[in-house]
Image (cartoon, coloured by chain):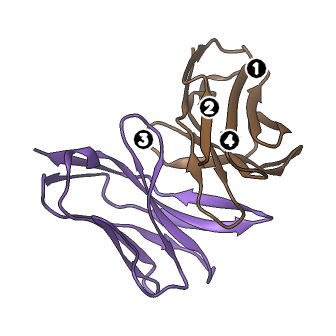
Chain colours: A brown, B purple
């Protein structure tokens, strides 16, 4: 069966510090990978998606970037965090025409 | 642009009773998918049920069923025999294909509390 893991689960970082959230998928190959952000009391917003190694598409301009160094690894990064980057970040995977399956989420607090 | 609207920020239901969560969406697409996701306090998003727009028959998954009205662009979720474990945020989502991947457009969610 397929599983998806992301870490860290919780992160508290000062403004201006770097960020790296990691996500890995097991039990499938060539998945589509996604990063979503959920602001407090709101739905999810797609940040990045990837259909293959090294292929990243951004949905909204922001202070964040994403990379896919391996088939089943997806990384969300920032060089300098802003207060507005605080939120709950969810990684997800899907096959081409299927539903998305989400990881456990990472809560980021920028102070 | 696709939008998904959940007009009920909070709802409550007695244990063992039935509750219906509302969702409407706006799209010019003809082929798409609709989903209900559940987000318990653990915060992980869990798929509850899915509906393909080309299917007229409403999807059912154990105690969960939907009322899909394509012309009205309505997609409500009915939870029968509510259980305490159903307490969670419920998100309605519309999926559209894009350049080999999928994008889910989420509503703002309905917080459901099951009362013992």
Residue that label 2 marks: A6
Q: Earlier in the sequence, mark 1 or mark 3?
A: 3
Q: Position of residue A59 (x, y in %)?
A: 73, 51
Residue that label 4 marks: A26
Locate the C terminus of chain B by quadrant: top left
Query: To which chain does the residue with label 4 belong?
Result: A
Residue that label 3 marks: A41
Query: To which chain does the residue with label 1 belong?
Result: A
Residue at 76%, 43% in the rendered image: A61
Q: Earlier in the sequence, mark 3 or mark 2?
A: 2
Residue A11 shown left or right of residue B69 in the figure: right
Q: Position of residue B72 (x, y in %)?
A: 42, 83
Residue B62 shown left or right of residue A74 in the figure: left
Which dot, 3 or 2, sits closer to the camera? 2
Can residue B105 be seen? yes
Query: To which chain does the residue with label 3 belong?
Result: A
């Amino acid at each position: 069966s397929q599983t998806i893991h992301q870490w860290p689960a919780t992160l508290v970082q000062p403004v201006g510090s770097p960020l790296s959230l990691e996500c890995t998928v097991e039990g499938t190959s060539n998945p589509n990978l996604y990063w979503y952000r959920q602001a407090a009391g709101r739905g999810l917003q797609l940040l990045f998606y990837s259909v293959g190694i090294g292929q990243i598409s951004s949905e909204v301009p922001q202070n964040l970037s994403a990379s896919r160094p391996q088939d089943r690894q997806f990384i969300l990064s920032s060089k300098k965090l802003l207060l507005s980057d605080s939120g709950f970040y969810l990684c997800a995977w899907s096959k081409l025409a299927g539903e998305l399956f989400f990881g456990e989420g990472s809560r980021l607090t920028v102070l | 642009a696709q939008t998904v609207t959940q007009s009920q920020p909070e709802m409550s239901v007695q244990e063992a009773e039935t509750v219906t969560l509302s969702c409407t969406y706006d799209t010019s697409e003809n082929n798409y998918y609709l989903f209900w996701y559940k987000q318990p306090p653990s915060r992980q998003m869990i798929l509850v049920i899915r509906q393909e727009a080309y299917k007229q028959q409403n999807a059912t998954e154990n105690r969960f069923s939907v009322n899909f009205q394509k012309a009205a662009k309505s997609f409500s979720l009915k939870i029968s025999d509510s259980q305490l474990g159903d307490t969670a945020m419920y998100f309605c989502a519309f999926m559209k294909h894009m350049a080999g991947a999928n994008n889910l457009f989420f509503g703002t969610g309905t917080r459901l509390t099951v009362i013992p």
